[in-house]
Amino acid sequence: MRITCPHCGERDRREFTYQGDALALDRPARDAGDGAWDDYLHNRENPAGDTRDLWYHDACATWIVVHRNTVTHAVHASTAAAKVKR
């Protein structure tokens, strides 16, 4: 699988560390109730198909949001996490 780093260009996935669903970027507000925080911390989907994942590029220390398909391993897009609108 090849992932495009916004700074370094296309690289082999072995240069990256998978960190899970990019849901981590959608953190609840501080005053959100216990239910919202419990859901955020403990409940995750495990979809077969298109996902939005958070990856870390070890070579340049950049966090990247990768849109990919978990069945075909096709990477549709990648964006620096700092530029993703929350």
Image (cartoon, rainbow, N blue to C red):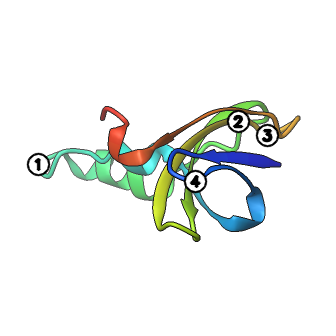
Tell me whether the residue at label 4 lies in contact with that at label 1, contact meaning CB atoms closer than 8 angstroms: no
Q: Nearer the viewer, mark 4 or mark 1?
A: 4
Q: Name the residue beneath numbered marker 3.
A: 70
Give the structural element (helix, strand or loop) at label 4: loop
Q: Name the residue beneath numbered marker 2.
A: 68
State the separation of the CA atoms marked 3 and 1: 34 Å
Residue 60 x, y percent position in the rendering? 51, 66
Is residue 39 depicted above or below 62 in this figure? above
Q: Which of marks 3 and 4 is in front?
A: 4
How busy is the neighbourhood of tag 3: few (under 14 within 10 Å), some, or many (20 plus)?
some
Q: Nearer the viewer, mark 3 or mark 2?
A: 2
First in sequence, mark 1 or 2: give its number: 1
Please say whether residue 64 is visible from this viewpoint. yes
Which residue is at the front of the view, 75 or 35? 75
State the separation of the CA atoms marked 2 and 4: 19 Å
First in sequence, mark 2 or 4: give its number: 4
Residue 84 x, y percent position in the rendering? 37, 36
Q: Name the residue beneath numbered marker 1.
A: 31
Which residue is at the front of the view, 65 or 49? 65
State the separation of the CA atoms marked 1 and 2: 33 Å
Q: What residue type is labelled 3?
A: Thr
Give the structural element (helix, strand or loop) at label 1: loop
Q: Does 51 sit left or right of 83 as displayed? A: right
Give the structural element (helix, strand or loop) at label 3: loop
